[in-house]
Amino acid sequence: MNNEANNAFCLIRPPGHHATPTRGMGFCLFNNVAVAAKYLQRKYHLDNIVIIDWDVHHGNGTQDTFYEDPSVLYFSLHRYPFYPGTGSKNETGAGKGVGSTINIPLAYDTTPKKYISIYEAILENDVKEFRPDFILISSGFDSYCLDPIGGLGLGISEYRVLTEITQKIANECCEGRIVSCLEGGYHLSDLPRCIEEHLNGLIN
Amino acid sequence: MTILVYDEIYKKHDTGLYHPENFLRIVNTVKYLKLTGTWQKLDIVKPRVATNEEIATVHSIYHREKIAELAGTGGGYVILILMFHPILTMQPYTLPVRHLRL
Ligand SMILES: [Zn+2]
């Protein structure tokens, strides 16, 4: 916000996107990204925050936090049916927040090509139309094809592609402002390579 | 410039080595990034601690107290939560809570 950096990646644990306002679950205690979104709104009076969640699991905690909040667009792609069970297509928000939750449940055999094209379409249309002032990413790398507890067909290099698509939209909408936070990703030797591809996308 | 937010303390949330969400996830990542030279291209920033008030924007007091209580029984470690520095851009900060064995 003070033009000190273009973007940031937070190499943190434990993850946060399953933590709801009232309980921790699925390895998550506090919802890092949700607290960050609230902070940005309060501190910098930003109107519209987008939270993109490409962790293989649905971020039920983040969705709960902002389900009736029209100022935060929550967009998640996740394997479905899968843990934690939420995230069906018809969960789109409630009250004033109707339309500010976008869930894309995906079958286990979804190809990377299809994944990327859906991702790009949502960003080019829904995210852009929302006019974000800031983009937060719940960056889970358990959508990597060899992840021992997740898996959704993505290869290591796909994380760079996803990042570049996101950066392009951020450049167009909000001066490139992205903060990405580590969520899942449990392949101990390939997680670092996935993260590096993501970082390469942010660095450029 | 791209910032990488990191603190050694993230290693100390001890879930046990047989838990998939264990400290090697980030230990291996730091090692690898240093080896390939990506680490050196980043601005490494140490986060600050989040306040109770900031956490309360999302979580109930009951939730916070429950975690603090559970963590108290698990040992003297620390877990961290990410938030943003009030003055500097995109500088996350952290909440020390005692260790919780999940
Ligand atoms: Zn996950």
Image (cartoon, helix red, strand yellow):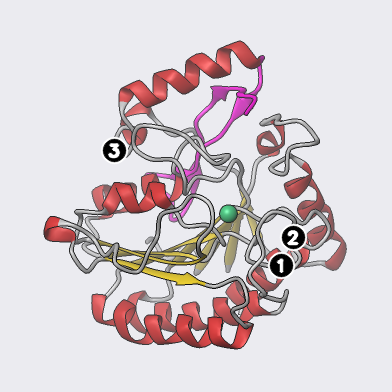
Give the residue at x 54% y 57%.
Answer: A82
Badges 3 and 1, same chain: no
Task: Identify the residue shown where x is 12% and y is 59%.
Answer: A96
In the picture of the structure, the residue carrying the numbered disc 3 is B57
Q: Residues within 10 Å of mark 2 (few under 14, many from 20)?
A: many
Cα–Cα span, label 2 and label 3? 31 Å
Residues rendered magenta in the picture: B75-102
Residue B32 on the magenta span:
no
Q: Secondary structure at mark 2?
A: helix
Kindly identify the residue that appears in the image at 50 percent across and 31 percent down. Answer: B95
Residue B89 occupies quadrant: bottom left
Mark 3 element type? loop
Q: Position of residue A145 (x, y in %)?
A: 71, 70
The kind of secondary structure element at disc 1 is helix
- Residue B77 is covered by the magenta coloring: yes
For label 2, the residue is A191
Give the quadrant of residue B63. Answer: top left
Q: Does A107 appear above or below B87?
A: below
Horizontal placement of B7 versus A163: left or right?
Answer: right
Residue situated in front as seen by the camera: B91 or A156 = A156
Number of numbered discs overlaid on the protein picture: 3
Percent position of residue A4, x then y:
47, 62
